[in-house]
Image (cartoon, grey):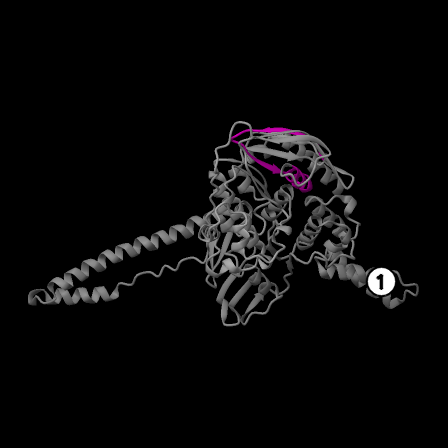
Amino acid sequence: MIQAINVTLRLGKKALFEDVNIKFTEGNCYGLIGANGAGKSTFLKILSGQLESTSGEVVITPGQRLSVLEQDHFKYDEFPVLDTVIMGNARLYEIMKEKEAIYAKEDFSDEDGIRASELEAEFAEMDGWEAESNAASLLNGLGIDTEYHYSLMKDLNGSQKVKVLLAKALFGNPDILLLDEPTNHLDLDAIAWLEDFLIDFENTVIVVSHDRYFLNKVCTQIADIDYGKIQLYAGNYDFWYESSQLLIKQMKEANKKKEEKIKELQEFISRFSANASKSKQATSRKRALEKIQLDEIRPSSRKYPYIDFRPDREIGNEVLTVEGISKTINGEKVLNNISFIMGHNDKIAFVGGNELAKTTLFQILMGEMEPDEGTYKWGVTTSQAYFPKDSTKEFDNDLTIADWLMGYSPVKDITYVRGFLGRMLFAGEDGVKKVRVLSGGEKVRCLLSKMMISGANCLVLDEPTNHLDMESITALNNGLIKFPGVALFSCRDHQFVQTTANRIMEILPDGTLIDKITTYDEYLASDAMARKRTVYTANREDDEN
């Protein structure tokens, strides 16, 4: 159990949290949600002891071990992957290293023997002999192949490092597990594995995530941060949303009835207060009126952008033809004879773990990279808007947001441009902010503004939900669902893919393509995917044995 008692955190004059009292108990997975800037990550740091609150305290059941998903991807660069995972249980790793040092001594003394015996007993009690196999099992489950387990962390790419740090947090059955955006940079297979792990996990989990499907799968309760308070709701994310909306609706209905009653009483008092025969009744109604209190309905701090892609031109029957595209990067064939024809009603989701292949294909289709072999052709009625995974070059200038968007606007009118910025929550003085200093989420909203203002009828989006909060993801999801054009996109958000795509493509590790006209859930349940996953699971079990 971990509990916050009267926790307050002040940043200057602003109170981010005010007298927060909340208890997180064993056997529950809590989804910590709130708008960007509400303090989700900050609250996790207070719970973990990484940040000290202004007042109040955090209490953990004595003897319980707390584990945190770390964010520094370079901290363990000089350590082997397996060692990094085992460090998740600091005491166990300390014992292992002390044992190694003692047994490496040339002048092994009686005192060393006694100490080694004590360490061996504690090591066995902590299930130390299974440490390496348990660590390997976690790594395999997250998609880190056995060949990397003895590599140094610095030899892994960014996505692999994220998985190792996640395995480190999960290692050794911690009593309390704090996870800040654990699905970031995970492929959908790894996310599915993590979902199963957390569903079976019997201790306390507190997780921050912008993945609605993930929260629905793993959470038993939702802790909602709004205006410096945290309110607990039983159930998963959908239950929270329905419950919170129902509560607001009920309060509004109750206030409406009270307002009607107030009006009725006021009319009676006004009509009969001067009437001697009715004066007692009027006085009685005055007292009743004074007792009626309207419920204070404070609006949420959450803000939803308005995302509406309106194509300037209706798309024709010929949209996109791809024939035999192949591409090799750094000696690896990431695209291998890729061919498909896109229809005028298609919204295609590219899924699977081959992220480089997806990005490479999008860059080729948008003319940013040449294929080694093959061709592609856009229809004459098409116009494209592109959301790149890496937008660094796009914002490497000193333009203000308004001037930056003006450069892409077909209408050179500042009021017109500011209208698009306003839809994406850039209001007032925000328009004069330099694009160079924008946060990740603000840059994404700028790129979406650029796509909206373009009037394109074909959208190409490479991981657009990265850096977005839940509200923006929901708005983008809804915007793509109602978009009358076509779309090609990659996204790790399960619900986003399931509700938007009518066609699924997966580029396999060998660069070849699986193409199915189906929903994402149906694709995952298909016989082909079932066979693939059986092989994947069997390989994991072989590695574990």
In the image, 366 versus 235, the foreground residue is: 366
Residue 330: % across, % down: 77, 42
Residue 73: % across, % down: 70, 56
519, above or below 254, in the image: above
Secondary structure at numbered mark 1: helix
Q: Identify the residue at image location x=90%, y=64%.
A: 108
Q: Identify the residue at image location x=51%, y=47%.
A: 409
**What segment carries the magenta color?**
335-364
The residue that label 1 is drawn on is 101
Residue 140: % across, % down: 71, 44
Quarter holding the C terminus? top right
Residue 487: % across, % down: 55, 37
User: Does residue 430 appear anywhere in the picture?
Assistant: yes
Q: Is residue 349 magenta?
A: yes
Q: Quadrant of residue 544?
A: top right
Q: Amino acid at mark 1?
A: Ala
Q: Is residue 92 magenta?
A: no
In the image, 270 versus 391, the foreground residue is: 391
